[in-house]
Image: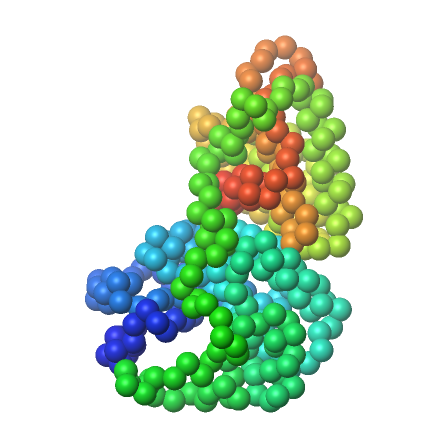
Amino acid sequence: MTGALDAGMSEDVSLFINIEPLSTRIVPAYAREIIGTAATRLNVVVELTERSLLADPAELLETVRRARKSGCLIALDDVGSHPDSLALLEFVAPDIIKLDYTLSQSDPSPQQAAVVLAVAAYVESSGARIVAEGIETDAHLRRATALGAAFGQGWMLGRPAPLPTLGDRQHSGAISARPTLSVKSGAHARADTAVPSVPSDLLTTSSAQVGSKSLLLALTRQLEDHARHMPDPLTIQAAFQDSAWFTQSVADRYARLAAVNPFVAALGVGMDTEPAAGVRGAELHPDERFVGEWTITIVGSHYCAALIARDLGDDGADHDRRFEFLLTHDRLTVVAAARSIMRRVLPK
């Protein structure tokens, strides 16, 4: 950032800064001062690597929140190198997607073709921009543009060199004339959607219904079964109220889901950190509002669904207990509920 400021760069050029989310926990005072100055004079893009997404999702979401609050755009780097991380695409809601160099330099494998389709669906709905990495030949350039990239990086466009001075700056990285990367896209709208304290805060008088626990059990099981047969990688998160409801049969189902999906989590009072093989657990305090939640969220590139329910506090038989609930496939609602749960999940 200091070098960019000294070179006279301004908002007409985007400055990409690649970080690991865990490195943002402790920022020295001198760095905060530089960042504060740069935020007012530069168009900063915080670039996150795919490999960082699954390690500590709660810290990742907090890093993204702070960066956006500072006025930065968000880019996701090396997309295509770790296909499973596409399941978190909606949670990061990047403004810019940087395709891994392998997608520019060779025809995609079946696994990479699935990545291309997922990226295309996200870009179409969000307005995010694509940057292609590794452009070194005319063939790479043709393949990058065919993948929808409007910007690129690689030796064909420019080799590493000192920053240009203010007078001789050239925009050699643009594949074609397109609006500046600083323009807000629909990805901002997704990212700016408020994250509720608990998922049931999303319920409204017009949307909510009332049903028994036995009904919710049937709906939840159907969503879990549907997720088990989905070909795309998913994030699956569930709030169980109490670990007592995470029985052995439930644990077996969630272990099977975790075996084929990159992120599966379960919350509840007394929940272990790994209540089933591959499942992330998060313990709830008995007195907190989350204990009244019964929610399952499923988010993938082409599918999303959620059952969001709030315990109405009935006495009597357990299977007759009533819940106010919403069954929805609206992506913004599902992702907002999923983010509310993900904030509670601890790192591996």
- Left or right: residue 138 compared with residue 292: right
Residue at 48% in and 57% down:
185
Q: Position of residue 156 (x, y in %)?
A: 53, 88
Residue at 73% in and 34% down:
221
Q: Position of residue 332 (x, y in %)?
A: 55, 43
Above or below residue 253? Residue 132 is: below
Q: Nearer the viewer, residue 58 or 176?
A: 176
Q: Nearer the viewer, residue 259 or 185?
A: 185
- Image quadrant holding the N terminus, namely bottom left
Q: Position of residue 266 (x, y in %)?
A: 59, 40
Residue at 68% in and 52% down:
302
Q: Position of residue 21 (x, y in %)?
A: 43, 61
- Left or right: residue 187 compared with residue 26: right
- Left or right: residue 261 compared with residue 154: right
Tell me the quarter of the picture where residue 309 sits.
top right
Specify the farthest residue to the top: 316
Q: Nearer the viewer, residue 164 or 226?
A: 164
